[in-house]
Image (tube, coloured by chain):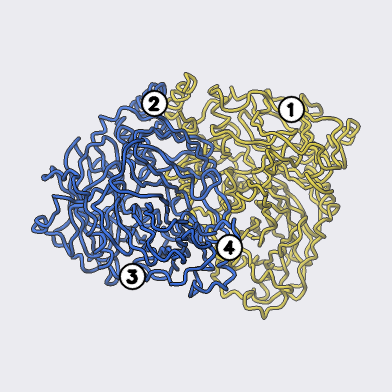
Chain colours: A yellow, B blue
């Protein structure tokens, strides 16, 4: 126990006297607790909020302050919630990331998140402690434009679909398998869920057109009954689609209908028309669908695995109100691209560009990190590493530790900013061993930072995995994607004119992805692969920006223990 | 955040400068983590210590100080360990009871238990947070006499058997069922374990004499292989038997062999001979067995459910070294008393008396509590209540809160000391509703306290349940057991001459149990039903004794959060 810790304590006393209350405030009470439920018609434990799975949808307007009083009613587990896509300007302590912005809320305690939503868009929230997202701790967060303001596209109605994956094993069993020798991979999920609803038995059926299967008949009121999208003919609907999957990348399609993509991760994109979208964990989109097909039919909406093989698709129905919901579609769901057809997902990804009129990114950078993602071993345990360091989070939060200069919390040596130029990304690592670490990349306020993510071969075999990387507290411009190993000449291919702003970007197999962002948000921010088992195995880094400018850390003070 | 909390903080700084180190110190590192294991031959998650299930056996000598550095390597759960039967004189902060002696240790943290074992005997340790005991967090703790000292009985060798019950559902599923509407009882365990080993498939077989069943053949090295007790003929063995069951009461027998009971809960008892013993959760015994049977045979050792119906018995073998271990016993296991034969268990219990020469209890009491145990509803949730209050523990520890006068932690009104004289214990409660509470019974130093536990009819039907009540920080004298409702005239039946000293005593259906103890141990102590689901549902009270005399609370200081 140091003088610094005492300083922290005194800060806390002082800060708790204050309460931010700017603008309209929306109050929510979130009670996190386990519940027995049937997400895919099979009974399982889920981590629910207020008895709901997924948790309640938060719907707010730009400029609102959300006050979410989160009470932990789990039995022995800590918990917290991250508000994915909300940049948390001025409220980095409310980002809800364990060991980074706060310590986990202990059972019986209530933590008060207070933050402003400053931008319209399709967001979601989820647990960010251990693998509680895999356990079902998530929900939607939709921010509408302020009254009187208009989106740059027209629609007559909207739907919101939160996509996730689901296992029949308990999350603890999955977690312990990842942390064991011998290593046990989680394997593919048993089901995919649309708004927390899937149909395991029914999805397992070879041909879903066969309506005689009793498990595919729903009387109504079942917990796993699909949520049917009821539409009028000849209208345009906005469908918000977000993926909070633990593991898998998804392909979303509506049979016989084209989609126009208009939003990605809360940013408007230049509209483009497509048959199906690829959505990776951590991403969100809005698409416009015009109901211009035969109004005497219903149509399959399908969510299928892209990049993996064994999990059956999730299905629901686009129901033209002109026919009953009970009429099964007469034509099959859209064909899903082959699981290893990365060209299809790349083609989709490359189409995403900023809406015309969006200001371009800074043309120069102040600092550039080259981050090599590898699969490794640490003392024989399976891990992921970035520049050969596998992230193991400390028990005290970085934000409190840096702000209050508490020593001994994390490694004061910053992690490496690049990797050996002779690293062979096309083969398994020569030396499979990495080490654990918890150092921090520190950025000066308003510096423009480039991150070049570099993918490589996995630990064994001839394979390279896909990783959707998510940045907290910011959007970044996606300057480009490229095959193979990044080289100086690749910079000439960067899109500095209309790159999309996003909070999540894919790193394709054997490829690189170039990102740029402005370190304009004092705080400490996670940057990590959004595949939860990968993060659990160390695939992340920590960015700290001008923490001396953070002047208000309520609640997380208690994080520091003697 | 109050001035008192600041005082607490300053205390902590001061106290952490000190380190008790009187006498010989035994150091242990306990690493609590989940492990995939096959306790009963079926794969399941277990809460292990140092990769072992049950945790390592601690073996110490009277006068030793144990220093156990407990590191929480769970993913998102807090944890702690209670040292069951160790009175913790002078170290109430090391009792390891969540919300009472300390807050749970958070993931990644290490807590240092330091306490003296001042008395020989058969003890054990276990999780005391949520239902982590049910999850497998337990192990044995044996204290031997100091060198040169002798037990008041002879034996040539010894064995140690820790008994437990095991479910195939996850502990979280069991817990959430108990906390749900509709209520889901845990139901009977799938298996009984002897030193963490059971044989589900084999035990399910109707007749275990049938050696042709492949699942009953062990090649050696299986995680669920029974631990065979190898003995020489014509010797006397001490068998230590402790029950850390979550739920069930057990009957222990060795076919064809008598047992002499010599120890109960770390206290010597007047030896008596018996065919089988009844052991309830929280109890421990030592029995002496003389190997005076046909040395050309092996014999079944059986652990069977007493008081419940469906779980098959656990078996192992008493192997006379004169024959191979692989020879199956030629005679069946001992007959188990009928599950509802309470007379059998009562007859056994009444035989337990203090060893001749043990000082008698105080003949007078200073204070008497009458505690009525009932099954109730609170807002429709199934609960247990004591004098109509169902215990819900606070988030800050009582010990810290009382010592440092932190307000707002628990109800300052003490709970009721008795119950309505016209309560009908033979029928379901007239009013099923109780309320939750967390008040404390405060005792003056060295006061002699009587507790009369009163059982009653359950919430529904014509049934009354058995509850083994366990007191922390003390032994109590069991002054007597009686049928029906306790009345003044029952006091004349109290045994004030040679009542046994124990830390756990049974409250039989529709009965009362009278206990006496001396409040000679400054601290805060749980007194509760040792059936973990019952405690989870509120069946406990909190005793505080002269907390002003407690002068050293390291480590638990961090419990208080802003």
Number of the label disc, if any, that sits on residue B218: 4
Subunit under mark 2: B
Residue B411 shown left or right of residue A175 in the figure: left
Residue placed at 73% from the left, 50% from the top?
A: A280
Q: Chain of mark 3?
A: B
Q: Residue placed farthest to the bottom in the image? A: A212
Mark positioned earlier in the residue sequence (4 or 2): 2
- Secondary structure beneath dot 4 equals loop
Pointer 1 local density, CA inside 10 Å: few below 14, some 14–19, many at least 20: some
Residues at discs 3 and 4 in contact (Cβ within 8 Å): no
**Tag nearer the camera, 4 or 2:** 4
Please identify, in this view, whether the residue under mark 1 or under mark 3 is nearer the observer. Answer: 3
Per the model, the C-alpha gap separating discs 3 and 4 is: 29 Å
The residue identified by callout 1 is A416
Question: Crowding at label 2, few (<14), some or many (≥20) Cα neighbours within 10 Å?
Answer: few
Mark nearer the N terminus (2 vs 3)? 2
Mark 3 secondary-structure assignment: loop
Q: Residue beneath label 3, please?
A: B337
Q: Is residue A442 above or below residue A129?
A: above
Q: How far from the left and from the top, in percent, is residue A157?
A: 66, 59
Q: Earlier in the sequence, mark 3 or mark 4?
A: 4
The answer to the question of whether label 2 and label 3 lie on touching residues, with beta carbons closer than 8 A, is no
Whole-number angstrom distance, CA of label 4 to CA of label 2: 46 Å
């Amino acid at each position: 126990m140091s003088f610094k810790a005492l300083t922290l304590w005194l800060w806390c006393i002082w800060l708790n006297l204050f309460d931010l209350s700017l603008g309209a405030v929306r109050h929510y009470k979130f009670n996190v607790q386990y519940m027995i439920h049937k997400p895919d018609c099979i009974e399982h434990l889920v981590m629910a909020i207020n008895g709901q799975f997924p948790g309640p949808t938060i719907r707010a307007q730009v400029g609102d302050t959300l006050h979410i009083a989160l009470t932990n009613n789990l039995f022995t587990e800590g918990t917290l919630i991250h508000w994915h896509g909300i940049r948390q300007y001025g409220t980095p302590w409310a980002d809800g990331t364990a060991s980074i912005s706060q310590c986990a809320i202990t059972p019986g305690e209530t933590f008060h998140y207070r933050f402003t939503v400053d931008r319209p868009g399709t967001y979601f929230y989820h647990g960010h402690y251990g693998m509680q997202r895999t356990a079902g701790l998530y929900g939607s967060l939709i921010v509408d434009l302020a009254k009187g303001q208009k989106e740059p596209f027209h629609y007559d109605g909207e739907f919101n679909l939160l996509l996730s994956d689901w296992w029949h094993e308990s999350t603890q069993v999955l977690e312990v398998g990842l942390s064991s020798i011998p290593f046990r991979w989680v394997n593919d999920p048993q089901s995919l869920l649309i708004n927390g609803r899937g149909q395991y038995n029914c999805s397992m059926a070879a041909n879903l057109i066969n309506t005689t299967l009793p498990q595919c008949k729903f009387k109504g009121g079942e917990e796993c009954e699909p949520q049917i999208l009821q539409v009028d003919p000849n209208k345009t609907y906005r469908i918000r689609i977000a993926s909070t999957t633990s593991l898998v990348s998804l392909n979303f399609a509506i049979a016989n209908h084209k989609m126009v993509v208009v939003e990605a991760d809360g940013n408007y994109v230049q509209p483009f028309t497509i048959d199906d979208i690829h959505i990776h964990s951590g991403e969100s989109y809005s698409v416009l669908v015009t109901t211009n097909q035969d109004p005497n039919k219903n149509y399959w909406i399908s969510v299928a695995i892209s990049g993996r093989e064994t999990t059956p698709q999730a299905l629901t129905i686009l129901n033209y109100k002109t026919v009953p919901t009970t009429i099964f579609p007469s034509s099959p769901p859209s064909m899903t691209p082959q699981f290893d057809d990365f060209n299809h997902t790349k083609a989709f990804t490359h189409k995403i560009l900023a809406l015309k009129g969006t200001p371009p990114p800074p043309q120069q950078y102040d600092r550039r990190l080259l981050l090599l993602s590898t699969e490794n071993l640490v003392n024989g345990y399976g891990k992921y590493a970035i520049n050969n360091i596998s992230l193991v989070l400390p028990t005290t939060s970085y934000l409190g530790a840096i702000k209050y200069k508490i020593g001994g919390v994390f490694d004061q040596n910053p992690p490496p900013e690049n990797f050996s130029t002779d690293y062979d990304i096309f083969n398994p690592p020569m030396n499979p061993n990495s080490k654990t670490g918890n150092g921090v990349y520190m950025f000066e306020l308003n510096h423009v930072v480039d991150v070049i993510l570099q993918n490589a071969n996995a630990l064994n075999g001839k394979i390279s995995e896909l990783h959707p990387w998510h940045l907290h507290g910011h959007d970044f411009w996606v300057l480009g994607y490229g095959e193979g190993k990044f080289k100086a000449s690749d910079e000439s291919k960067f899109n500095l004119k209309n790159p999309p702003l996003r909070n999540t970007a894919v790193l394709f197999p054997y490829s690189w992805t170039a990102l740029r962002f402005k370190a304009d948000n004092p705080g400490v921010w996670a940057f990590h692969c959004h595949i939860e088992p990968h993060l659990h195995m160390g695939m992340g880094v920590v960015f700290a920006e001008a923490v001396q400018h953070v002047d208000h850390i309520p609640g997380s003070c208690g994080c520091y223990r003697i």
